[in-house]
Image (tube, rainbow, N blue to C red):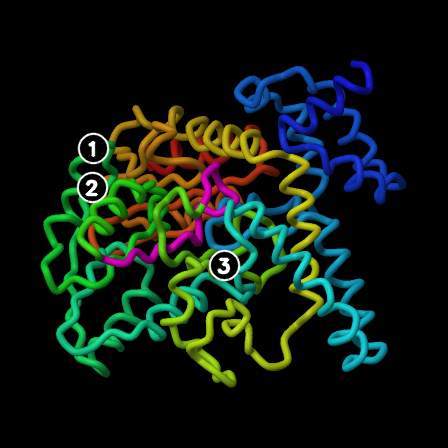
Amino acid sequence: MNPSSRRRFLRQTGLFSATAFLGALSGPAWSRNLNRAMERTAGMSAAELAGNEDFWYYIQQSFTVSSSLINLNNGGVSPAPKTVQDAMKRYYDLSNEAPSYYMWRVLDQGREPLRRNLARLAGCSPEEIAINRNSSEGLETVIFGLQLKAGDEVVAARQDYPNMVNAYKQRELRDGIKMVWISLDLPSEDEDYLVRQYVNAFTPRTRLVHITHIINWNGQILPVKKIAEEARRRGIEVIVDGAHSFAHFDFTIPDLGADYFAASLHKWLYAPIGSGLLYIRKDKIRNVYPMFAVDNPLKEDIRKFEALGTRPFFIEQAIGKAIEFHDMIGIERKQKRLHYLKNYWMEKVKDLPGVKLNTSLDSRWGCAIGNVLVEGKKPAALDSFLLEKYKVHTVAIEWENIRGVRVTPNVYTTTQQLDVLVEGIRKFVES
């Protein structure tokens, strides 16, 4: 491939930062091998590359994952690649040379460039992005900061994340708002059904609808945009829990129609543990109180949501390396690979006696996260069996009407490892 063709390919696939990313790491063998693997696969589409184990083996070498445990619970928190780990450690060491100088006068100067980079991924203005510690912090900033009054109604699902459920219950107890809970029958590939559950709960008193983009229990993708369109038509604000969707598959936050959106960057962006973002549409910032006090809580500056006091700057600035890693792979490649891995193991177990899949195989309704139930047996029993007999780490789920074991591979997961999972499920079924 000639140089101009290579540059064109890198731009088209989101890999243009690979040169800078790998150039700084030309010493380690894994980085040189990854660079060569990218060159060899330059002409392959994302769909073709999804099942190319040789290529993804080199991606795996970018991580320091344990060789004695197969980690299939990346839905909780993902490990960061080596470059992110190294950056965080380097910034931490620098901070400790003279904390008040290097944290506030050096590292903190990187926040605005980082904000611009996150906004680029989100498809929005930097003036709509606040950097924080996780999606729970971001969502609860909005939940507790919105000026709701007694009698105002909020629509949310019982399948939403517990922290959010409890936050709304606290506002209900403290301020007298009225929660309208819906329950979703999942998995579902019926867009009309999913939209209708929310719309049917709307009344003239509904002020806010809470939508989880990907249900963490089973990986169900909800049609956020369609629900948001119906809500906004009725003057209802939209808050989206994007803990599992941001950097997982291709979308922009504004295209969802969200007024508020929060994500944990230590999940699918592979940023350091304890990093997140909060999006608030520009014209909504003024009316949301920050969680921590500032000079003017109703000002229009998104930075008012970053008044956390002394924070771990070394974690925050290492997010930049995670963005470089994400750009190097490219969102389309990542999305195709993650969906391929989920379907790889689910296709192999779906016809086993008593096995029930709680996640769609259709890419419109599911990506990396899968959930499986062996009927007549407790999810915790399968989870323990896989860990004890096969050293496969998953998580048992029993929340509302969703029961099963959640399995979440990642870009560093190999099909050989998933074959071990499949063998474990097969043996459990036979036991």
Q: Which residue is identified by label 1?
A: 190
Looking at marks 2 and 3 on the same chain, the residue that comes earlier in the sequence is marked by: 3
Q: Position of residue 119 (x, y in %)?
A: 56, 51
* Label placed on residue 128: 3
Residue 10 in the image: state x and y as whole percent.
70, 27
Q: Position of residue 239 (x, y in %)?
A: 33, 58
Q: Are marks 2 and 3 in contact (CB under 8 Å)?
A: no
Front position among marks 2 and 3: 3
Q: Secondary structure under badge 1?
A: loop
Q: Is residue 248 magenta?
A: yes
Q: At 47% from the left edge and 54% from the top edge, which residue is drawn? A: 76
Image quadrant of residue 92?
bottom right
- List the single residue furthest toward the right: 27
What span is in magenta?
236-252
| Amino acid type for the residue under numbered disc 1 | Asp
Answer whether residue 423 is visible to the viewer in this image.
no
Magenta-highlighted stretch: main secondary structure?
Answer: loop
Residue linked to disc 2: 194
Q: Amino acid at mark 2?
A: Leu
